[in-house]
């Protein structure tokens, strides 16, 4: 984490004064845990979870909400405001999330490195775990009650990455290991 904590703030800003860093990978690959640890290593920078912007009906059609609620305000040096999607109530609800511009903002979730967002990213990190292992971990995490959801998710994620793969554009591959995380050069090299 120390290498990333030194490298990321030195990258050129990509959204206003913000360095938007995407953490992408298959569902269950460890994106949320890694992003939380990286945010802490960076002094508590904000993390935008794409699960908060996706819906049951629009698993991957959240780019408009992300732009309107988060990226446009940050581009203008303003505080982003949004409500997270409640996956049980099936609507956007709860307290308003406020995200002030910060030197680094992490964007975490499946599809964070999509084609439409890459021009606004300072860099793209990919969690290097096969979809089979990722989905197995995710299903173990979520339990049998979400088995039907997972079947639909697998089809949707496969279709998404078939049409708009992120991994070939990753600057760094992140692999979990016994010591924590191993950082490897990605197909796109370092930014």
Image (cartoon, rainbow, N blue to C red):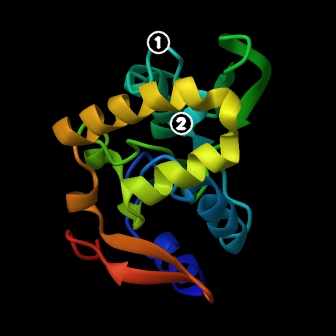
Q: Tell me the residue that label 1 is attached to.
A: 57
Q: Is residue 95 left or right of residue 33?
A: right
Residue 6 marker: none
Q: Quadrant of residue 64?
A: top left
Q: Distance between the residues labelled 1 and 2?
A: 14 Å
- Point 41% across, 45% down: residue: 112
Pointer 1 or 2: first along the chain: 2
Q: Is mark 2 on a helix, strand or loop?
A: helix
Q: In which quarter of the image is residue 168?
A: bottom left
Residue 66 vs 107, above or below: the answer is above
Q: In this view, does 27 lie to the left or right of 123?
A: right
Q: Residues within 10 Å of mark 2 (few under 14, many from 20)?
A: many
- Point 25% across, 32% down: residue: 159
Q: Which of marks 1 and 2 is in front?
A: 1
Residue 172 locus on image (x, y percent): 35, 73
Where does the C terminus fall, quadrant-wise?
Answer: bottom left
Residue 177 vs 58, above or below: the answer is below
Q: Can residue 3 be seen in this view?
A: yes
Most extreme residue toward the bottom, as rendered? Answer: 179
Residue 24 locus on image (x, y percent): 42, 53
Q: Is mark 1 on a helix, strand or loop?
A: loop
Which of the two residues, 169 or 59, is positioned nearer the viewer here? Answer: 59
Q: Quadrant of residue 180?
A: bottom right
Residue 50 marker: 2
Which of the two residues, 158 or 3, is positioned nearer the viewer here? Answer: 158
Q: Is residue 17 visible?
A: no
- Point 58% across, 30% down: residue: 147
Residue 160 locus on image (x, y percent): 28, 34
- Point 61% across, 60% down: residue: 35
């Amino acid at each position: 984490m120390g290498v990333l904590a030194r490298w990321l703030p030195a990258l050129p800003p990509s959204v206003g004064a913000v360095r938007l860093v995407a953490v992408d990978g298959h569902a269950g690959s460890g994106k949320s845990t890694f992003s939380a640890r990286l945010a802490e290593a960076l002094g508590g920078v904000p993390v935008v979870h794409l699960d908060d912007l996706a819906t049951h009906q629009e698993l991957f059609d959240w780019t408009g909400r992300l732009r309107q609620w988060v990226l446009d305000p940050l581009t203008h040096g303003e505080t982003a405001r949004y409500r997270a999607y409640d996956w049980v109530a099936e609507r956007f609800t709860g307290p308003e999330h406020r995200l002030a511009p910060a030197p680094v903002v992490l964007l975490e979730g499946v599809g964070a490195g999509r084609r439409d967002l890459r021009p606004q990213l300072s860099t793209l990190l990919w969690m290097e775990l096969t979809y089979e292992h990722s989905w197995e971990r995710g299903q173990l995490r979520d339990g049998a009650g979400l088995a039907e959801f997972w079947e639909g998710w697998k089809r949707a994620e496969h279709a998404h990455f078939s049409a708009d793969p992120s991994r070939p554009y990753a600057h760094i591959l992140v692999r979990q290991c016994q010591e924590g995380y191993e950082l490897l050069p990605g197909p796109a090299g370092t930014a």
